[in-house]
Amino acid sequence: MQKAIYPGSFDPLHNGHLDVIGRAARLCDSVVVAIAANASKNALLSTAERIDIIKNATAHLPEVSVTEFEGLLVDFVIEQKADCIIRGLRAISDFEYEFQMALMNRQLRSTVETIFLMPSQEYIYLSSRIIKEIAATGNDVRDFISEKAAVAVEKKLALKKK
């Protein structure tokens, strides 16, 4: 496989995301981590902060690049001349949604394939939403995200409290 797109909000990037990125990097020549610009999600971290965090966390993986995109994912995949979409699956509930999206993407662009990767068992419970909830209560999240991400999350949460 040549080039894969791993889309998501990555707000914040966590160890489960990093595990999937590493797995994809072993399978593909090039992996583009693509941050979806979605105003309705009300992200904690800015796109620029997320790009910086992901670049820092994946610096040891030369085949990984980071960017943002707007619009339909399948259009971005075609624009990037990518071969597939990488999606992480943690649980059955993820599968239902991801399966529906993969079928819709295939309907829109029959040449776009989706590959599902499961993170290591130690990361299966992680989600960005849960990490933000834990951090918002003042608990340390450094076991789940990088130091750089933890500092950014703590800083944003402190600003929100003011």
Image: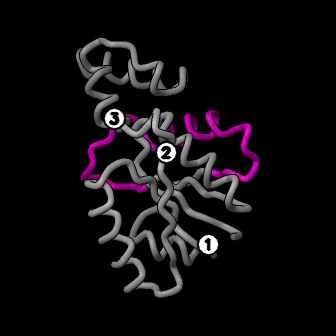
Q: Nearer the viewer, residue 119 or 31?
A: 119
Residue located at (61% from left, 55% from top): 24
Eye-nearest disc, 3 or 1: 1
Local crowd size for mark 3, using a 10 Å CA cut-off: few (<14), some (14–19), many (≥20)? some
Picture quarter with the C terminus: top left
Which of the labelled discs sits on residue 82, or is there none?
1
Q: Earlier in the sequence, mark 2 or mark 3?
A: 3
Where disc 1 sits, the SS reads loop
Q: Are marks 2 and 3 in contact (CB under 8 Å)?
A: no
Where disc 3 sits, the SS reads loop
Q: Earlier in the sequence, mark 3 or mark 1?
A: 3
Q: Which residues are magenta?
A: 36-65
Q: Earlier in the sequence, mark 1 or mark 2?
A: 1
Report how far apart the C-alphas of labels 1 and 2 lie in the structure: 22 Å
Instruction: Give above or below for 64 relative to 158.
Output: below
Q: Are marks 1 and 2 in contact (CB under 8 Å)?
A: no
Report how far apart the C-alphas of labels 3 and 1 lie in the structure: 29 Å
